[in-house]
Structures are given as C-alpha cells and as structure tokens.
Image (cartoon, grey):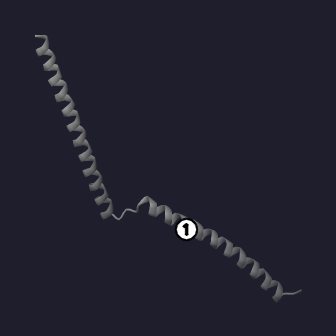
Amino acid sequence: MVQTTNRFFDEVARLMNDAAGAAHGVRREFETLFRSQAERVLRELDVVRREDFEAVKDMARIAREENEALKARVAVLEAAVARTANPG
C-alpha cells in the first residue's frame, strides 16, 4: 500500500508540474499576443514613441538655446546701430 501511495503522489506531483509549465506557456503566449495587439493599436492611433519624443524634445531645447543667443546678438547689434545713428 505504501508503494502505491507514493506512486500516486508522484503522479499527482508530475501532473501538477506539467500543469504549471503549461500555464506558464499560456501566460507567455498571452503576453506576446497582448503586446502585439497593443503595438498595432498604438501604431494605428499614430502615438509617438518615447524615443522619438525625447529626440524632438532635445531638438526643441537646442533651438530655444540658439534662439536666445541670437536674440542677445541682435540686441547688441541694434544697440551698436543706435549709437552709430545717434552719436551725440
């Protein structure tokens, strides 16, 4: 009887282990399917990817800095022109 009980528990343990492996596989498959569907929906909505957003954000920052530098140069040049036009 003891050997039969051990064999029974071994079979139950093997079945549980197989079920856990199958559940893990199903979970992985579901995640892959969900991710691909989410990417498809986002592509159809024309949602910007994070990397693209960060790149444009950096470009805008650089453009603002250049714009501020040019404003300062124009102010200096306008002051020089004003002094030349009104020497007195």
Q: Quadrant of residue 82?
A: bottom right
Amino acid under disc 1: Ala
Q: Is residue 1 above or below residue 61?
A: above
Where on the picture, by quarter, is residue 19? top left
Residue sitting at x 14%, y 24%: 11
Q: Left or right: where does residue 80 sit relative to residue 51?
A: right
Q: Is residue 4 left or right of residue 23?
A: left
Q: Residue furthest right?
A: 88
Q: Which residue is mark 1?
A: 60
The quarter in which the N terminus is drawn is top left
SS for callout 1 = helix
State left or right for residue 61 relative to residue 75: left
Callout 1 crowding tier (Cα within 10 Å): few <14, some 14–19, many ≥20: few
Q: Position of residue 44 (x, y in %)?
A: 30, 64
Residue 87 appears at what percent x and percent y?
Answer: 87, 87
Observer-nearest residue: 62 or 24?
24
Looking at the image, the residue that sits furthest to the bottom is 85
Q: Looking at the picture, how far across and down is residue 23, in whole percent?
A: 22, 37
Quadrant, the C terminus = bottom right
Is residue 21 positioned above or below 34 on the image? above
Tell me what residue is drawn at x 30 percent, y 55 percent. Answer: 38
In terms of depth relative to the viewer, which is nearer, 71 or 26?
A: 26
